[in-house]
Amino acid sequence: MGVSTSDGPQVIGIIGTGNISAAYLKIARDLNLFRVKAVTDMDAARADTVAAEYGIQAMTLEGLLADPEIVAVVNLTPPGAHADVSLKALNAGKHVYSEKPLAVERGDGQAIMDLAHARGLRVGCAPDTVLGAGIQTAREIIDAGRIGRPVAANAFMMGSGPESWHPNPDFFYQRGAGPLFDMGPYYLTALVTLLGGVQKVSATTTTASSQRLITSQPRAGEFITVTTPTHVAANLTLDGGAVVTLVTSFDVPGSDVPRIEIHGTDGTLSVPDPNTFGGPLKLRLRGEKEWTDIPLTRPFAENARGIGLADMLAAAPGQPHRAGGDLAVHVLDVMHTILESAEAEKTLTPRTHAERPAPLDAQPTWLAATLPT
Ligand SMILES: NC(=O)c1ccc[n+]([C@@H]2O[C@H](COP(=O)([O-])OP(=O)(O)OC[C@H]3O[C@@H](n4cnc5c(N)ncnc54)[C@H](O)[C@@H]3O)[C@@H](O)[C@H]2O)c1
């Protein structure tokens, strides 16, 4: 089921040319890990502008999906459109790499995986920040036993909401987004990558305000009606027994709490922001009074959104890729379980399970020939 060939970078198409598309287009241009042949957007003018900027083609959705040269599509539409677009691409015979979350509803996430399996196609999903230098070096330290047995972790995404910077922030306050579905995938994917799948969940939520005022341009002064919780506090028990406190919030004016800390029997690891690829990574062993900065020993310390796609495109037949759909289905399921636990005021068990993906090699084969010196 591998999609690599010896004829140079794989050819892909991008669906959705909004805010995040530049990150994928830039890495394709700068690192040559894959070649973007075409983009499409339901706003054709937006696709035209992006295509002109990168010297590539703007196509209709149908045209892009019918192009035989394009082996995979990257789905950069808003969360509510993910399932529909990914299913269309799979039905057209294309491998799919989706921005997070894989879908809004559990059933849609599973339908994507079922169709992919039936058609022998691959599904990958962001975030691939967990394949970056920061989280991968943290994984190396945990796996080497330097903090002993992981006992607990705390993970905090404390923000005041994207209406101050995103040009089109409505979707962040609808089902399928909010701080949990928008930012939770970074934190949950990092926790599963570092420690293991989620076995048990209990949670509480609140919403500071039913209306949010947009202060970013071009829509400053408009209000958004909030239909999903904006502060979500969860306790998770992971494989291996580590107990995690996870808080995701758009209701916090300011905070100094760390992003992720993992506490083991022999030491604590301070893990970098999982929405980035780099550091800082710090270690404090039991009895030590100071933190030690840990040098990053893995590649990709700078923004490298797209390496999960490169890893998927290069995977050998029968070998799993790392930023995989099954992991994304588990993360989606855990997020629903968190909201359901808060509503039911009960501890719940997620319906799915995921194993830790394999660490990224220090020298991925698809990287050796392509990193600039
Ligand atoms: N903006 C960020 O910083 C950021 C960072 C990481 C991940 N993401 C994720 O990337 C995805 C896109 O986010 P964004 O910020 O770029 O959103 P955006 O609103 O800026 O852009 C989305 C684009 O998709 C197009 N679109 C919507 N439905 C479509 C459809 N059915 N077919 C074709 N085009 C369609 C829209 O016209 C728009 O141009 C989301 O899943 C988000 O969670 C965004």
Image: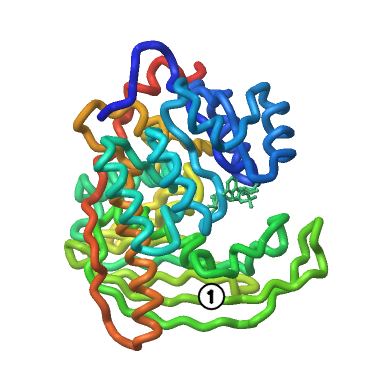
* Identity, as a three-letter code, of the amino acid under mark 1: Thr
Q: Residue most toward the bottom? A: 345
Above or below, comparing residue 96 to residue 371 in the picture: below
Q: Residue at x 29, y 29 (%)?
A: 315
Residue 342 relative to residue 302: left or right? left
Figure quadrant of the N terminus: top left
Q: Can residue 37 be seen by looking at this rendering?
A: yes
In the rendered image, which quarter is residue 245 located in?
bottom left
Residue 286 relative to residue 210: left or right? left
Q: Residue at x 32, y 79 (%)?
A: 202
Q: Nearer the viewer, residue 304 or 119?
A: 119
Residue 86 relative to residue 24: left or right? left
- Give percent across and percent down for residue 360: 31, 36
Residue 206 relative to residue 296: left or right? right
- Give percent across and percent down for residue 159: 59, 67
Q: Nearer the viewer, residue 309 or 246?
A: 309
Q: Residue at x 40, y 50 (%)?
A: 292
Q: Can residue 129 be seen by looking at this rendering?
A: no
